[in-house]
């Protein structure tokens, strides 16, 4: 049990579909993140939420829309995606503030395939 | 451009061997993380360090700030150590702890 749960584990969607990825953390952390991991590439930060407020949007296309209703839940809404968006999408959480680094706790990811 | 480089990209070892994975970075950092990613995709944080050395079981992480280099060592390797090992850094000029730059990872395979 990692403390960060992502659903679904696998998702196949067409380019005209709308779907959502869900992330839930049970660690009491105040920050949550979405990362994208494409084949043979390093993890890329997409979005950061601190205390439910979006603090970072790393030039992500608008077809990806995050939502953070509370500090324990994070969603990534997907619409009109492209085949190159196929990747592993990872959610993470951490405790930010206090002037020190905090380890990231990752979920198991959602393997997304866009057809 | 701030960069993180890992070597080797792929590593195959026999069970019991001592393993070293390297990470080099281009400018000053405030923290370096070592992460482990298993085939299912989930990532586990192994170490976070800013100086010296840390040890947890058979894993040892060292960092040399002057040389801008870190190593992850695995003693008495086992097939269950097979995974991708990822180095990530927080640059010294970054104010947010969430802003990490990741290496491409090292795929380790330990054969029985």
Image (tube, coloured by chain):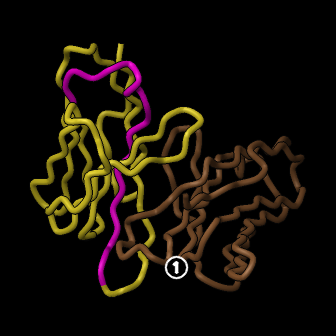
Residue B38: % across, % down: 58, 45
Residue at position x 70%, y 44% in the image: B107
Q: Which chain is brown?
A: B
Place of residue A19 in the rendered image (x, y in percent of width and height, measured from the top left): 20, 27
- Could you tell me which secondary element the residue under label 1 belongs to? strand
Which residue appears at 17% of the width and 23% of the height? A18
x and y percentages locating residue B10 in the rendered image: 77, 42
Vertical comparison of B11 with B95: above or below: above
Q: Quadrant of the C terminus of chain A?
A: top left
Judging by the rendered image, the residue that carries numbered circle 1 is B30
Query: Label 1: few (<14), some or many (≥20) within 10 Å?
Result: some
Left or right of B25, for residue A71: left
Q: Nearest the camera: A64 or B77? A: A64
Q: Answer with left or right where residue A80 lies relative to residue B89.
A: left
Q: Judge whether B69 appears above or below A98 on screen.
A: above
Viewer-proximal residue, B82 or B2? B2
Q: Is residue B58 magenta?
A: no
């Amino acid at each position: 049990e990692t403390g960060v749960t992502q659903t679904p584990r696998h998702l196949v969607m067409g380019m005209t579909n709308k779907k959502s990825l869900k992330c839930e953390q049970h660690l009491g952390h105040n920050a949550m993140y979405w990362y994208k991991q494409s084949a043979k590439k390093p993890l890329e930060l997409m979005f950061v939420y601190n205390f439910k407020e979006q603090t970072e949007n790393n030039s992500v296309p608008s077809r990806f829309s995050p939502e953070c209703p509370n500090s324990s839940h994070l969603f990534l809404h997907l619409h009109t995606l492209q085949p190159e968006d196929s990747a592993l999408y990872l959610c993470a959480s951490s405790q930010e503030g206090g002037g020190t680094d905090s380890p990231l706790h990752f979920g198991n990811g959602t393997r997304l395939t866009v057809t | 451009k701030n960069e993180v480089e890992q070597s080797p990209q792929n590593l195959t070892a026999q069970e019991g061997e001592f393993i070293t994975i390297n990470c080099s970075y281009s400018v000053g950092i405030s923290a370096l993380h070592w992460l482990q990613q298993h085939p299912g995709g989930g990532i586990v944080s192994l170490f976070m360090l800013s100086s010296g050395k840390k040890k947890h079981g058979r894993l040892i992480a060292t960092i040399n700030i002057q040389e801008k280099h870190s190593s992850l060592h695995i003693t008495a390797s086992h097939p269950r150590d097979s995974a991708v090992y990822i180095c990530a850094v927080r640059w010294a000029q970054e104010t947010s702890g969430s802003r990490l730059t990741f290496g491409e990872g090292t795929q380790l395979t330990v054969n029985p």
